[in-house]
Image (spheres, rainbow, N blue to C red):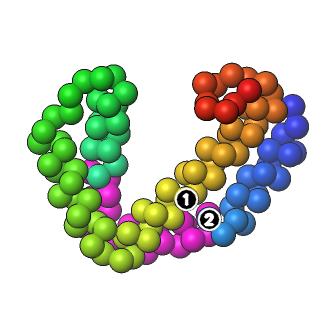
Amino acid sequence: MQYDAAHTLARAIRESEEYQTYHELKERVMANETNAALIREYKKLQVSLQMAAVSGASPDPEDVQRFQGINTVLFAQQEVAQYLLAEMRLTQAMADIFRIITDAAELDMGFPGGA
């Protein structure tokens, strides 16, 4: 294995604009306890709703309503919205990198367009 290459990749990720923006916004946004608590609840509900969708189960209507309410509150705050969007961009970049690596290893991970 090329662990040196992996460490180089990790360093490149930390130096990337996507990571730098995400990290800076995360520190500022999460310093506010209310925002931090809302973001944790938002992510918990998001995972729960995604799991229900994947399993074919109907989502709990209360969870859907709560998620929508928290979503509205969070995205109404410009800096929080910027943080969540930066997190999405970083997550997408990481998914792209993972896909490139698994394609290079010829692992079939079930990605559309993958090896």
Q: Residue furthest front?
A: 113
Q: Is residue 68 left or right of residue 39?
A: left
Distance Cα–Cα, label 2 vs label 1: 7 Å
Residue denoted by label 2: 18
Badge 2 vs badge 1, beta-carbon distance below 8 Å: yes
Q: Which residues are magenta?
A: 19-41
Q: Is residue 9 above or below residue 29?
A: above
Residue denoted by label 1: 89
Residue count near mark 1 (Cα–Cα under 10 Å), binned few <14, some 14–19, many ≥20: some
Q: Is residue 80 magenta?
A: no
Q: Is residue 79 left or right of residue 17?
A: left
Determine which quarter of the picture holds residue 6. Answer: top right
Determine which quarter of the picture holds residue 31. Answer: bottom left
In the rendered image, which quarter contains the C terminus? top right
Q: Position of residue 50 (x, y in %)?
A: 34, 36
Q: Position of residue 10 (x, y in %)?
A: 74, 52
Residue 2: give its label.
Answer: none
| Residue at (29% x, 37% y) in the render | 49
Q: Is residue 24 above or below residue 58?
A: below
Name the secondary structure under disc 2: helix
Residue count near mark 2 (Cα–Cα under 10 Å), binned few <14, some 14–19, many ≥20: some
